[in-house]
Amino acid sequence: AQKITQTQPGMFVQEKEAVTLDCTYDTSDPSYGLFWYKQPSSGEMIFLIYQGSYDQQNATEGRYSLNFQKARKSANLVISASQLGDSAMYFCAMREATMYSGGGADGLTFGKGTHLIIQP
Amino acid sequence: ETGVTQTPRHLVMGMTNKKSLKCEQHLGHNAMYWYKQSAKKPLELMFVYSLEERVENNSVPSRFSPECPNSSHLFLHLHTLQPEDSALYLCASRPGVGSYNSPLHFGNGTRLTVT
């Protein structure tokens, strides 16, 4: 079963509108971290925002915010006032804490991504 | 400018060639990673190094051979690759393994084409 699910392969949004990119995750670990990355056509993966499983408040970083609904295992990325430069692939990722005690994977587990296109 | 630099940016190689991908990080991190990104697939973790010691190998074929001579440099040596190995190879780093809350810092990647 997939650990990270991004159900929107592609999205078209008008410039200046707000955008919500969906991400659901699957884990039985009470301690985990959720990450969002942006990948422009140049290829670099750019870290945007982080949400910890115990964080009481939704994370925010400038125009990026995370709508974290723990009971639903949902961590949607919200981009306010979208810009043409926001056009890119967006990836949701997770790291579980029990990976360390169990000797499991240290790297992030990624979803398949959403291709966001901002139209003028 | 990214703190993680990958060279070359693009590489075309035949199935019998031997080549190497290079990654250098200027962030003072102790953990380095290789990921493979194929079209329409999630990023796949290949190798993890912590303080120059390999701590993880995710069932990667032996035609991919990593090397980490120091905590700032990571190589991926390639030999007798297959066309399905064509992908974007991404290097990443973070301060250290052992915590779940620090992000990975990625380079621009090497676009590899195997002919």
Image (tube, coloured by chain):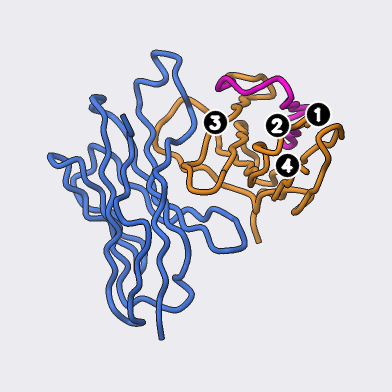
Mark 4 falls within which chain? B
Q: Distance between the residues labelled 4 and 1?
A: 18 Å
The quarter of the picture where residue A111 lies is top left
Chain of the residue that carries numbered disc 1 in the rendered image: B
Q: Residue at x 63, y 26 (%)?
A: B49
> Which of these two is toward me, A1 or B101?
A1
Q: Earlier in the sequence, mark 4 or mark 2?
A: 4
Percent across and percent down for residue A48 are: 43, 56
Rendered hue of chain A is: blue
Residue B9 position, x and y percent, is 75, 54
Q: Colour of chain B?
A: orange
Work out whether mark 4 precedes mark 1 in sequence or the reverse, and give the earlier one.
Answer: 4
Tell me the CA gap for discs 4 and 3. 17 Å
Question: Of helix, strand and loop, which one carries label 3?
Answer: loop
Q: Which of marks 4 and 3 is nearer the N terminus?
A: 4
Question: Which residue is the site of mark 3?
Answer: B96
Query: Would you name the residue on which mark 1 appears?
Result: B79
